[in-house]
Image (cartoon, grey):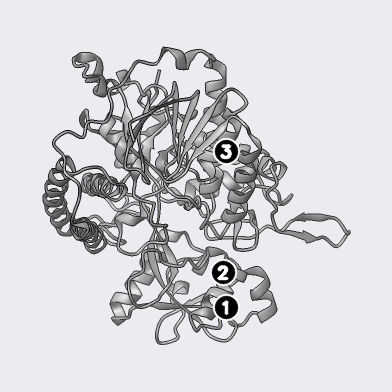
Amino acid sequence: MSTEVFTSDFLVIGSGIAGLTFAIKASDLGTVHVVTKKKDFDSNTNYAQGGIASVFDPHDSIESHIKDTLTAGAGLCNETAVRILAESGPERVQELINWGAHFSTRKNPNGSVSLDLGREGGHSYNRIVHAKDLTGQEVERALLDEIARRKNIRVFENHTAVDLLTQHQLKLTGKHINSYNNIRCYGAYILDNTTGVVHLFTSPYTLLATGGIGQVYLHTTNPAIATGDGIAMAYRAGALIADMEFIQFHPTSLYEPGHKERAFLISEAVRGEEAILLNSRGERFMEKVHPLKELAPRDIVARAIDMELKRLGDQCVYLDISFKDRDFLESRFPTIYHYCLGAGIDISKEPIPVVPAAHYLCGGIVSDLNGRTSISNLYVSGESACTGVHGANRLASNSLLEGIVFSHRAFCHIKEIFAPDNKDALPPFPQWDKKGTFDLEEWILIQHNIEDVKRVMWDYVGIVRSNRRLERAARRITLLEEEILDYYRRSTITSRLVELHNLITTAKLIVQSAMLRKESRGLHYNTNYPQQDESLNGSYIISSQQQPLFMKISEISFT
């Protein structure tokens, strides 16, 4: 099968809430190609149990949502971006409802029906819109149903993005591509996983919505596809990357002995329903750590659990909600209840064994308030983006909201400049060059490399870090990168090989960012720098085109 060229008005890479929201809106202007690695639309969106943070309670306020977000972000949030997020939230959630998403409701004393708002860590009010404990799955279902109704959206399942199309592939050299703000994106090389052929997907506008990086770590709540693809591709193309040191470890994933590719998440909403954390001695420990106890921000809860595990030499702590009625638990948390029951744990009678696991990246590809990256015509939304909303620590359930809010803003920005004939003026790009490569015969080599990366990151760049650990990680990641890049250049492309390439690139960016930050702040806790340093109230910006910069995300503008 030979290489084909697929041209559209919009190319969307990723099929979570950010990518699908943008695709639906963009289809009002022109043709849309959506590329996704999985056939079943596996994504972090699907596994989002908690919900979407937004102000619907009359006792709540936009200002309170903003304050809670800024507090969690530990001084690194872009306040303008946070205000946009909070103010846009109700309208964007209503749009999901209009597209068919069914969220949990409750009957009020006066007979009216309203959204059943939950509460999670760091929130001052109940503002979590949810569909029991399957919010992400319900949102994804509604979006896919809407996608199916749009005739000019074509979805390419089981396809893997390899690299972005820029001037680099056109073999153009000189000053015009040595500066980050002079690079332009024209689409991407996309691998058909079924045939092994790399096709050209060209478009005037490309949106990266490739999700997170959880698979860089040994233990993660993320699905197998969360390998940092969009961030790694954008970095190789010369885009600005920031805040990669801020990895959120979810405090409570189910502890199941034996390694699993994805840890089962015990939603923060369980703690929102008054569940308490206990150590192996049956002692409640969060009371001594933070005024909000179990509802403290995630970084604080995760570190407290990590400290208890190390102090007592245990493998897990326990989350106890057994004082709640079984009917309530089965109704409010049906997925969690039945999964735990299948694992031999009746949460209505006994506590749940839990451990932290890598969950969410607060940094990523730097974008402005309209989703634009430093590469012209390349936009980003969702977990791949660094909008400045999350700062040094994401407030619970702001992630799905960020995806729909900034995908909407990216669409609105493009709508103002869109011309239907733009795709007719795209330059011709060469086919993917596979000369001199050989077909991969030893799968075990890739698997060992993947496990090596994950183990190094878990052991040295986890919840608690130190200069010595980071230096060891840097040395090991450098050696692994040399080995992997040599193997990558000599091998015929496969989806797993592309993921390995992206994993090592992402790991390198995380380590580099962590070494640059000489303080402990939010999700980055370094035992050599215990105090937050207000003089470092900015972000470390990394690009393959230049030396790292230090500045605030809000100070970066793209023309």
Spatial separation of the CA atoms under disc 1 and disc 2: 8 Å
Q: Which is more N-terminal, label 2 or label 3?
A: 3
| Local crowd size for mark 3, using a 10 Å CA cut-off: few (<14), some (14–19), many (≥20) | many
Mark 3 touching mark 2, by CB under 8 A? Answer: no
Spatial separation of the CA atoms under disc 3 and disc 2: 28 Å
390 sits left or right of 328 in the view: left
The quadrant of the picture occupied by the N terminus is: top left
The residue lying toward the viewer, choosing from 185 and 235, is 185
| Tag shown at residue 496 | none
Q: Which residue is depicted at the point 74% across and 49% down?
A: 58
List the single residue furthest toward the front: 1
Image coords of residue 151 (percent x, y): 62, 32
| Secondary element type, mark 2 | helix
Would you say residue 537 is visible in this rendering? no
Spatial separation of the CA atoms under disc 1 and disc 3: 35 Å
The residue lying toward the viewer, choosing from 120 and 536, is 120
153 sits left or right of 308 in the view: right
Camera-nearest label, 3 or 2:
3
| Local crowd size for mark 1, using a 10 Å CA cut-off: few (<14), some (14–19), many (≥20) | many
Find disc 1 in the rendering and name its residue.
Answer: 321
| Tag shown at residue 21 | 3
Find disc 2 in the rendering and name its residue.
Answer: 270
How many dots with numbers?
A: 3
Q: Amino acid at mark 1?
A: Ile
Would you say residue 427 is visible in this rendering? yes
